[in-house]
């Protein structure tokens, strides 16, 4: 399993990361595995763009 902290640091060095969420459960396909928390996270992201 990939260490999420390392992935996050790598992404921030190369890209302008404006939103990052790590879920306690689910896996590679959060929209199918944990749709409720995933949808809420997408809403939070787009609320910030208004």
Image: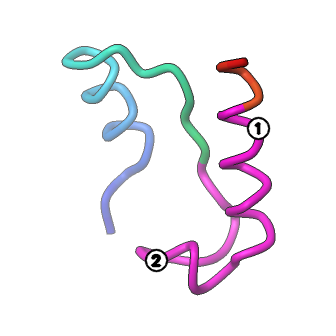
- Density class for disc 2 (Cα within 10 Å; few <14, some 14-19, many ≥20) is few
Q: Give the image location of residue 25, x and y in percent.
A: 67, 74
Q: Give the image location of residue 12, x and y in percent.
A: 34, 19
Q: Quadrant of residue 40?
A: bottom right
The residue shown at (65%, 59%) is 23
Quickly name the residue at label 2.
29
The residue shown at (42%, 48%) is 4
Q: Quadrant of the N terminus?
A: bottom left
- Identity of the residue furthest to the left in this view: 14
Quickly name the residue at label 1.
44
Report helix, strand or loop for mark 2: loop
For discs 2 and 1, the disc positioned in front in the rendered view: 1
Mark with earlier residue (2, 1): 2
Q: Is residue 15 magenta?
A: no
- The magenta segment: 22-46
Q: Give the image location of residue 21, x and y in percent.
A: 61, 44
Image height check: is 35 above or below 17?
below
Q: Give the image location of residue 19, x and y in percent.
A: 56, 29
Q: Viewer-proximal residue, 45 or 23?
A: 45
Q: Quadrant of residue 24?
A: bottom right
The residue shown at (72%, 21%) is 48
* Lateral position of residue 49 relative to residue 3, left or right: right
Report helix, strand or loop for mark 1: helix
- Identity of the residue furthest to the front in this view: 50
* Lateral position of residue 14 relative to residue 29, left or right: left
């Amino acid at each position: 399993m990939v260490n999420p902290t390392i992935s996050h640091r790598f992404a921030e060095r190369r890209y302008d990361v404006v939103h990052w969420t790590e879920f306690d459960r689910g896996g590679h396909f959060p929209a199918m595995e944990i749709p409720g928390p995933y949808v809420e996270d997408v809403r939070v992201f787009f609320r910030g763009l208004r």
